[in-house]
Image: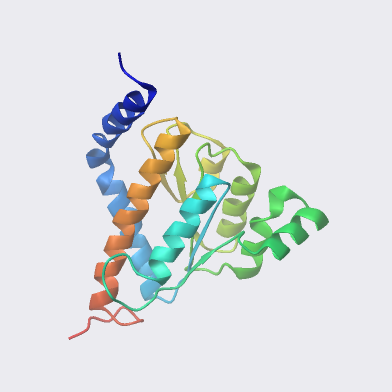
Amino acid sequence: MPTAENEAAADYLAIAQQLESLLPTIIKIGEMMRESLAKGGTIYTLGNGGSEADAQHFTGELIGHYKLNRRPVRAVTIGTDATTTSCISNDYSFEEIFSRQLEALALPGDVVVAFTTSGRSQNIVNALKASQQRGATTVLMSGANKGPADEYADYIFRSPTDKTPRIQEVHTFVLHVISNMIDQWATQTDEKGNTLN
């Protein structure tokens, strides 16, 4: 008789088999991020709960490194400053905790990456909308189902599932693939994207 643990593992493996067909989308997003970094852009990440952990994980890989010893690249996770987040939440609303910060920080040429399992959280929708209005390129890392955040996403990666744990596991795979791409690029180029000898 299958156990719950075995069912979860089987579920994940079934989803993982679908990832190869999604690689072109992941590569396209990674290439866009490298182009932004080469032009002096910053990658901003954000999310709620476990998705914020994914956002921080991605930023850590970018500022630190994934596997190769290389220079850090410009990356910031929005929402990790408790004082600023509580200030905005208290003075305005929780729905504006990300958008208010991005209105202050995001510039044309930057990339804003929102990790979300539903694509329906109003603070995520507002963040992507504000980022587009500031001229930043927006990326939505979401689940299988469409949501209101889609409207404000220039690039969308959908995990091939609507189950929260599986979505987050796929998001970790995606951020690792892109981190590896940026590692490779950053070891071969200077801060302006010029090829090193």
Where 195 falls versus 179 (above or below)? below
| Residue 118 vertical placement versus 111 (above, below) | above
- Is residue 138 in view from this perspective? no
Scheme of image coloration: rainbow
Query: Where's residue 61, x and y in %?
Result: 39, 64
The residue at the point 27 percent across, 79 percent down is 189
Using the image as rendered, state which of residue 102 and residue 175 is in the foreground: 175
The residue lying furthest to the left in this view is 197
**Which quadrant would the C terminus be assigned to in this image?**
bottom left
- 99 or 69, which lies in front? 69
Tell me if 92 is positioned left or right of 141 in this view: right
Which residue in the rendered view is the most extreme toward the top?
A: 1
Name the spot of residue 42 as percent of width and height, x first: 47, 70
Task: Say which residue appears at 27% left-offset and 39% top-offset.
Answer: 19
Which residue is at the far bottom?
Answer: 197
How many discs appear? Answer: 0
Is residue 12 found left or right of 91 in the rendered image?
A: left
Q: Residue furthest right?
A: 91
Q: Is residue 132 above or below residue 62?
A: above
The residue at 34%/79% (across/down) is: 71
Q: Quadrant of the N terminus?
A: top left
Q: Is residue 78 visible?
A: yes
Residue 145, image x and y in percent?
47, 31
**Residue shown at 54%/35% (left/top)?**
147
Specify whether 186 is left or right of 113.
Answer: left
**Residue 188, image quadrant:** bottom left
Name the spot of residue 135 as percent of width and height, x first.
Answer: 54, 63
